Image (spheres, helix red, strand yellow):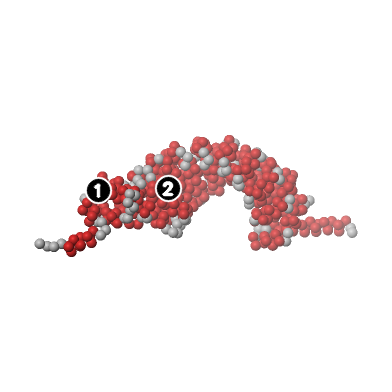
Amino acid sequence: MSQRQVLQVFEQYQKARTQFVQMVAELATRPQNIETLQNAGVMSLLRPLLLDVVPTIQQTAALALGRLANYNDDLAEAVVKGDILPQLVYSLAEQNRFYKKAAAFVLRAVGKHSPQLAQAIVDCGALDTLVICLEDFDPGVKEAAAWALGYIARHNTELSQAVVDAGAIPLLVLCIQEPEIALKRIAASALSDISKHSPELAQTVVDAGAIAHLAQMILNPDAKLKRQVLSALSQIAKHSVDLAEMVVEAEIFPVVLTCLKDKDEYVKKNACTLIREIAKHTPELSQLIVNAGGVAAVIDCIGSSKGNIRLPGIMMLGYVAAHSENLAMAVIISKGVPQLSICLSEEPEDHIKAAAAWALGQLGRHTPEHARAVAVTNTLPVLLSLYMSAESSEDLQLKSKKAIKNILQKCTYLPALEPFLYDAPPNILKHVVGQFSKVLPHDSKARRLFVTSGGLKKVQEIKAEPGSLLQEYINSINNCYPEEIVRYYSPGYSETLLQRVDSYQPQ
């Protein structure tokens, strides 16, 4: 065989390998092909090609493996069991930028599925190599490495700590300062994934100077970057008062309020989440948000959104209102109650209704003035129907019941209470009658109205256990009226009168 023929054989073999990896990489982009590729044992065929002498074959083999592993955890598991990870880690340190991107993609695709698979990546020494890639000259390599580190860190505290211990955070903070938007996004996302697990991890991110750089990007025109920046700041602020104050000190107010009007729904949601995570900690932080116009801005945002986008805003109003009667009044003055009532009636999802019910309960629980502000919006009957509906989730029933009790125990606005005499179950009725027993002794107009509207008659029809709290309340109400009036409205009194007519002998 001549030298030329030998070379032709090698060329054909190389061409066949190239066509094979390209075809597998292409087929792996379509979900309907995955099972067939898996059954054909494609993983074991791709593995030796990762060490191929031809760089493009290596890269395409890695890309194909990444696409397969990305699809489900079975295929990701096959990458681990096939001893492919050590090869990838070794090549990640040695090869060119195209291969590094492909290898980091495989690590990300494997690590995203479960803590166990992410731990397998840590165990094979990938973190140190990925961190070195964060210093690569090529932004695409940095991005691929940051993405893989974020996917590993997102699972739990231990994996996040491993990423921190490998020295990733200072380099991720440098990455968010790079000019490339895609790299900024992924680095901010990775910092968010690390911060979310514990105050200690969030503190590590803060100590690296991340907050100032993140805060500067709140007004960046790129919506996807804003989402990640707001998410990272939320994950830092949520843990403690100190961390929340550090975020506030980066002068995020009032600029963050502009994000509540953003065209991107997730920017709005993440901005509301950030404000919520700050507001929940202390009355002082909530007051700072009120002073910046944050409550009114969040209420407008809830009004212009639907579904889960509304949820953090609803909760934020509840947290602010819970702190003090002055803060609750600030929410009421900003027209928060009608907006929450709309959410309670309009939203189809029970968990959103439950959040609105909780927030309304926090608003109405402080003083009679607060309770009246909630009651006049006709919210109480809606809460009662949600509590009594068999279709409501257990959490919604519980939150509705608690909100009703919170509001009723302060409510002295009797027109809102009266319908409850007819519709409320015994455990709610007790609180309604209790409120009447507090108000009627001191209000002659209300006493007269209570008779003419049929309220006194209804109270006489209530069957209460002798000596019970409910019976005491009924007795207090009855003591507000002359005995003959109470008798007149008592059940069976008309029968008694007729009997007296029957037995009466005219003279």
Callout 2 amino acid: Ala
Residue at image x 65%, y 60%?
30
Q: Position of residue 56 (x, y in %)?
A: 74, 52
Of circles 2 and 1, the one toward us is 1
* Above-or-below relation of 312 to 253: below
Give the crowd class for mark 2: few <14, some 14-19, many >=20 residues within 10 Å.
Answer: many
Q: Position of residue 427 (x, y in %)?
A: 38, 52
Q: Position of residue 154 (x, y in %)?
A: 60, 46
Local SS, label 2 = helix
| Label disc, if present, on residue 480 of the rendered structure | 1
Circle 2 residue: 359
* Above-or-below relation of 501 to 331: below
Question: Distance of mark 2 from mark 1, alpha carbons?
Answer: 35 Å
Residue at image x 89%, y 59%?
1
In the drawing, does residue 324 fall left or right of residue 11? left
Lower position in the chain sequence, tag 2 or tag 1: 2
Local SS, label 1 = loop
Residue at image x 77%, y 52%?
52
Give the crowd class for mark 1: few <14, some 14-19, many >=20 residues within 10 Å.
Answer: some
